[in-house]
Amino acid sequence: MPHTNDTIVDALAADLRPVRPMRFAEGMALVGAAGAVTMLMVAGTLGWRSDVVAGQFHAVWLFANGLFLVLGLASASTVVAMASPRVGQGLHGWKWAAAAAVLLPATALILLAARTISAPAEWISPIDRYCLAMGLGLGLLTATALTWWLRRGAPASPNRAGLLVGIASGSIGTLALGFSCSFDGLYHVGVWHSAPILVGALLGRLIIPRLVRW
Amino acid sequence: MGAWVMINADWYYTALLTFSKAWLQRYYARKVAPCQQDDLVQETLLSLHRKLASYDPSRPFLPWLAAIARYRWVDHLRQVYRSREVELNDSLPSSDEHEGISARISLDSLFALLPPAQARAIELVRIEGRSVSEASARCGQSEPLVKVNVHRGIKKLSALIEKAR
C-alpha cells in the first residue's frame, strides 16, 4: 500500500529492528583479511621470493611495493569510509598516495627516455603480460570484499567508490604479486606492476557503480 | 525490561523520523518541484530506514541525513533527465507535464550557478539543439566562444552535481 508522508513514519517505526552499525575498524579488518588471504594464496601457489623470505630486499622492490601498500591502504580506507556517508566528509588522502605512486612509472619512463636505463628487449614481453593479468586476478578478492562492504552501506558517490575499489584491489593484487615476481628491473616493476592499478581503476569505474547503487 | 526498551526505541525512532521528515521537506523545497517533494521525502525516509547500519552513532546525525538526501536528489535528477531524454528520442508526447516543469526548475537552479554566457550557450546548443553557428548568431558570442562556454559550462555543472553527492 502506498504511504503518505504521515503514515510512512509510523510504518517505518513499526518496522524498526536492531542493526549492527558498520564500524570503520571492521571494514579495515575485512580488507586486511582479504589482503592476507591473497598473500597466502601467492605463497601457496606461486611461492614467495627467496631473497624476500630471507629478509634481503632489492631497492626497487622495496620502494615499489611500499608505494603499492600505501596506495592500497589509502584507497581501501577511503572506500570503507565512503560506505558511511556524511556531508563534509573530506576523503582526499588517497589522491596524494596516488600522486606518489605515479612517480614510479613516471621515473621509469623518464629514465628510459633519458637513456639512463637501457630499453627492454621487448616493450610488452610475456612476463609483462603475466604480471598485469596476475596483479588484476589477485586483486579480485579485495575487490569483492570492498564491493560487499559498499553494498551493505550507503555510498553517496558510486562512481568514485568504483574507481577507488579498482585502485585498492589493483594495488593489493600487484603488491601480493610482488612477493612472487623475481624481476626487479625499473621498467618492468614501474610500468607493468603499476598497470594492474590503472586497469583496475578503469574496470572498477565501469563495473562497480552499477553494483553499489541503492 | 526488553519490551520497555523496544517501546522507548520506537518512540525515539518516531521522533527522529518526524524530525527528519520536516528537515527533508525544507531541504527539497529549494531543489525540486512542489509536486515531487512528497515522493522524494518518502524515498529518502525509506533509504534512511534501509541504510541505518551505515550511520555511525559516534558522529552527528544531520551530516549523515544530508548525505543521503543529496544522493536521493541526484538520483532523482538523473531519473528525470533520463525519462526526458527517452521522451525526446522517441518523439513521444510527455505523459506528465509536471516532470518537464520539474526538470526545468532543477535545470534553472543549476544554471543560476553558471555565468550567464555559459548558461545561454548550453541552453542554445545542448537543450534547444541548435548548431554552434546558429547559437552564435542568436547570443552574439563568436563560434569558438560558444564552444568554449558549452565545454566549460558542462564541466562546471558536472562538478556541481558531483560535489552535491
Image (spheres, coloured by chain):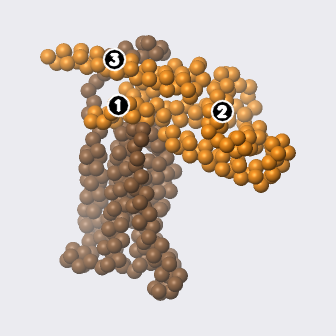
Percent position of residue B165, x then y:
49, 40
Same-chain check, marks 3 and 2: yes
Judge depth for marks 3 and 2 and give the one in front. 2
Query: Which quarter of the figure is the N terminus of chain B placed in?
Result: top left
What color was chain A assigned in the picture?
A: brown
The residue carrying mark 3 is: B14
Instruction: In the rendered view, tell whether residue B36 sits above or below residue A44.
Output: above
Quarter occupied by residue B99: top right
Residue B65 lies left or right of residue A119; in this view the side is left
| Mark seen at residue A169 | none
- The local secondary structure at tag 3 comes to helix
Chain identifier of the residue bearing label 2 in the image: B
**To which residue does mark 2 refer?**
B108
CB within 8 Å, label 3 to label 2: no
**Few, some or many residues within 10 Å of mark 1 (<14, 14–19, 20+):** some
From the viewer's perspective, is A77 left or right of A123?
left
Residue shown at 64%/41% (left/top)?
Answer: B114
